[in-house]
Image (cartoon, rainbow, N blue to C red):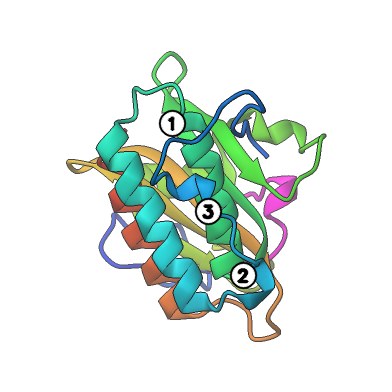
């Protein structure tokens, strides 16, 4: 497992720094809403999906996180992120001020009954990323730097902080890459950049 970038360090080990609510049926996307576009997924390459995701974030920024449809945007962002990184699972969680733990706001790929730990996350890789404010990649779950893994973290994953003005406000993560090579540094950098974009609007 390797955190990317700055951060406060990791505990000992082999590591080195390195489906939520959607738009309701009665909701009608306004003209120009990126969610109104539904291109053929099979025909979209990674670059096209990346552009689509960035347009979604731009639209999310323009509408503001306090708008009622922001949950739908967060859900769509997580879905698109899973596709771009060729991941089976993705999670976006935010800090609950009352408990100072991570509360999952939306997820992709877990089906109708996600693991119980997804209700509140305070340990594992996700909790550590929130604490140190640095992205971490785990391409072998037995190289976990001595951190106790949550049950759904026992796979290849990338977790990156959502940051707003230097403050950690949440964590975004992708898991179970469909590529044999696993996750690359480009995936980590993309997820880190995405975390800054979203975090700045929350």
Check if mark 2's residue and mark 3's residue have beta carbons within 8 Å: no
Q: Position of residue 29 (x, y in %)?
A: 49, 36
- Foreground mark, 1 or 3? 3
**Visible residue check, residue 1:** yes
Residue at image location 61% in from the left, 34% down from the top = 22
CA–CA distance in space, label 1 to label 2: 36 Å
- Residue 112, image x, y percentages: 81, 35
- Choose the circle earlier in sequence order: 1 or 3: 3
Q: Earlier in the sequence, mark 2 or mark 3?
A: 3
Q: Which residues are magenta?
A: 146-155
Is 155 situated above or below 196?
below
| Residue identifier under label 1 | 70
Q: Is residue 92 left or right of residue 108?
A: left
| Residue 147 belongs to magenta span | yes
Around disc 2, counting alpha carbons within 10 Å, would you say few (fewer than 14), some (14 to 19), or many (20 or more)? some
Is 157 situated above or below 90?
Answer: below
Q: Nearer the viewer, mark 2 or mark 3?
A: 3
- Give the secondary structure at mark 2: loop
Residue 37, which numbered label? 3
Dot 3 falls on a residue whose secondary structure is loop
Magenta-colored segment: predominant secondary structure: loop
The mark that comes first in sequence, 1 or 2, is 1
Crowd class of label 1 (few under 14; some 14 to 19; many from 20; radius 10 Å) = some
Q: Which mark is residue 143?
A: 2
Instruction: Examine the structure image and report whether residue 137 is included in the region drawn in magenta.
Output: no
């Amino acid at each position: 497992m390797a955190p990317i970038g700055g951060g406060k360090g990791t505990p000992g080990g082999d590591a080195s720094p390195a489906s939520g609510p959607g738009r309701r049926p009665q909701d009608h996307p306004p003209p120009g809403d990126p969610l109104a576009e539904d291109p053929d997924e099979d025909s979209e390459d990674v670059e096209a999906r990346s552009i689509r995701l960035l347009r979604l974030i731009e639209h999310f920024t323009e509408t503001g996180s306090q708008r009622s449809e922001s949950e739908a945007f967060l859900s769509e962002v997580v879905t698109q992120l899973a596709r771009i990184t060729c991941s089976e699972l993705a999670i976006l969680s935010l800090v609950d001020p009352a408990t100072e733990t991570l509360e999952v706001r939306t997820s992709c790929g877990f089906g109708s009954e996600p693991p119980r730990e997804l209700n509140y996350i305070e340990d594992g890789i996700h909790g550590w990323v929130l604490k140190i404010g640095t992205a971490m990649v785990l391409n072998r779950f037995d190289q976990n730097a001595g951190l106790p893994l949550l049950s759904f973290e026992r796979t290849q994953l990338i977790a990156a902080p959502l940051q707003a003005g230097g403050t950690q406000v949440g964590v975004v993560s992708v898991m179970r890459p469909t590529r044999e090579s696993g996750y690359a540094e480009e995936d980590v950098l993309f997820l880190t950049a995405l975390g800054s974009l979203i975090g700045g609007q929350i």
